Image (cartoon, grey):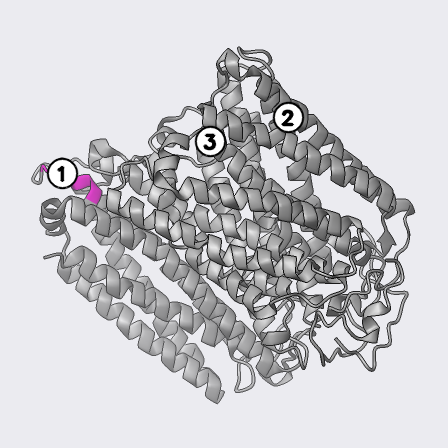
Amino acid sequence: MSHANAEVVHGDNYINHSKGIKSWLLTLDHKRIGIMYLFTTLTMFLIGGIFALGIRLELFSPGMQFLKPDQYNRFFTYHGAIMVFMVIIPLIPAAIGNFVLPMMIGAKDVAFPRWNLFSYYVYITGIVVAVSTLFLKGVDTGWTFYTPYSIRSSSSATLVLLGAFIMGFSSILTGLNFIVTIHKLRAPGLTWDRLPLFLWAIYATSVIQILATPVLAITLLLALLERVLGIGIFDPKLGGDPVLFQHFFWFYSHPAVYIMILPAMGVISEVLPVFSRKPIFGYKMIAAATFGIALVSFLVWGHHLFVSGQSAFANFVFSLLTMFVAIPTGVKVFGWLGTLYKGSLRFNTPLLYAFGFLFVFTIGGLTGVMLATISVDVHLTDTYFVIAHFHYVMVGGSILAFLAGLHYWFPKFSGKMYSEGPAKVGAWFVMIGFNVTFFPQFILGVLGMPRRYADYLPQFTTLNRISTFGSWLLAIGFVTTAINLIYALKKGAKAGDNPWGALTLEWQTASPPPMENFNYDPVVKEDPYDYRGAKALMGSNV
Amino acid sequence: MAHVPAAEHHHAHHFSSGVEEFDACKQGVWIFLVTEVLFFSGLFLAYAVLRVFHPEMMHKAHKLLDWRLGGLNTLILIFSSLTMALSVSAAQRGDNKKVIRYLWVTFVCAFGFLIVKFFEYRHKFLEGMLPGAHYTYPHLTEKTAGLFFTCYFVMTGIHGIHVIVGMGLIYWLIRRAKHGEFGPNYFTPVEATGLYWHFVDLVWIYLFPLLYLVS
């Protein structure tokens, strides 16, 4: 992108503009709100991760070691509910998206800054309501809240349902805000066919958020009313239907998988061109594939109900539609590979994570096609194969891409540069640890180990031990990364405004950015990935 | 909040003009209404599923509702939509007196709707026509009849909450209008509330036949 009159002024920025905790908590600035989201989601990630380590520790040996069975049920429920609703869904859109989106389009803020802050507090309220149950009777329903158990469970399921219901509104408001922002506040010259792919991804994600989340809201509300008042809608004794809950739930929660993965794909689409110094391969196809995935995501929820008494015909249709997801996904993967081909690769940490994403996410995607095949799925339903599959997509996809994005935009967020050495060590621990943790779970699943049990048969011991060992490697990786970034915040060298030599707008201003993002009115004259020109060589730190 | 007369209204710093701000707000409201449609669609789907499962029960149970009261409320809401539209158009013309007058009429209509609803609910409660397990009405002993009243109370209840929120918004508009905050160059809140109010009416126009006129 060209910025003829770009005069970047340093000094006053969004961090030092005003001081004190109040100036953060009441801020309307999208950058500060993004940072608050980042801090909150990462805190929840730590809590959810501790539950995960607890699960793996208990599964180190057959029999019960550290936890009682009902404690184990609470551990996997909290792990799932926290990671899905409080971490991965808001992680990239609300944290990175909030910070980067207005800057990428050359705007001063999102369209509705007050609603943006409000949505953050809605999210916090939801967390407080849901997590308060840790100090009450806990919750043991699994993050899916399947009826009839979630209606009868003597745990504090009511509050967790309420918390998830509240958090949904935060997601809706964020999505709404982003859509209007992208429509109305783009800089002159930033036409739709020049919109960075990260924003196409956020846009598609926002569409899913506003269309699917309200359905989750009504579902959780009905489940709440069922639990508190006994309205009978999911209760077969009164003529209701528990499977109806599953349909409702997955009508949201399957698209929610794409709320988690589309922004991750968007991050990858930004990182790959910058670190291979080449235009993205197939810009239009990748943008179209993003919407293809978003569209199909609404038509595949039934593949969660293959063994729930759905008709054979419906199973067939959902199986077929699910396989369609592989087509736009494949388009993207080949687009990314085409971008790398003959590029001048620079193996900084973001690219390392992007490679990890390509490798791991592809495994996650392909095992998804296996699970979409009904005859295979009937065998693998509710086994560790399913666990491994969606962790390959959610952790291997979303979290790795998030880490790529976090390292990529860290200099912009903070104005500081992290040190590559420890960052790469952390990345290798994360990626190796991840595969050591979850690959054995594919095998365990095929061998028939069921999910959600606190105990297992002795023949599964070795593979479970490998998996638990992997979870420790994974933890070392995350801790190394966290320490490295915190150290960089305090003592890191100055990063410069555009250390990667990237061409998108957020890099054409100071790091950290000034309060109104730009000291000039940005005008866009070129494509966001045009790395062939002289400008492409200007990266200083790469 | 300080009251800013319409003539002095300034758009927020991140918009380039008042028109851009208005467009963004209007688009935001429309998208919000889309989420509302999806929210209610869950209820309509649940209603449809239960009706397929229990067609006879739904038919018998709907006769326990008084279609005349439902019809009266339908007329009240349609009339209130008209007055709401008139207040928006008055705001665009800068006729502040009429803005306030039509908003009050809309507000009173909404209140009237709730009064009628209150008497309907009271009657159902006293007769034991209650949701799910709480259903005790002796003259219709279908085992699943409680489910009809689940639909009835959840759907009209959530709609009723929307009416109450609408009344709050209309009252807020009246207070701002009294300070002369709306005029030809700034009427976004009136327009936005208007769109919301029409949506609330529209939901009722679907609820009325589905609940009161089952055949």
Is residue A409 placed above or below A379 in the rendered structure? below
The amino acid type found where label 2 is placed reads Leu
In this rendering, which labeled residue sits more in front, label 3 or label 2? 2
Q: Indicate which disc residue B137 carries.
A: 1
> Do residues under tags 2 and 1 come within 8 Å of each other at their CB atoms?
no
Residue A273 pos. (x, y %):
71, 62
Q: Please give left or right for residue A34 compared with residue A333 in the image.
A: right
At 34% from the left edge and 68% from the top edge, which residue is drawn?
B108
Q: Please give left or right for residue A377 compared with residue A137 in the image.
A: left
Q: Is residue A240 in the magenta section?
A: no
For marks 1 and 3, give the CA distance: 37 Å
Residue topped by disc 3:
A142
Residue B120 pos. (x, y %):
21, 52
Q: Please give left or right for residue A144 compared with residue B59 in the image.
A: right
Q: Nearer the viewer, residue A188 or A434?
A: A434
User: Callout 1: 10 Å neighbours few (<14), some, many (20+)?
Assistant: some
Give the residues in magenta.
B141-147
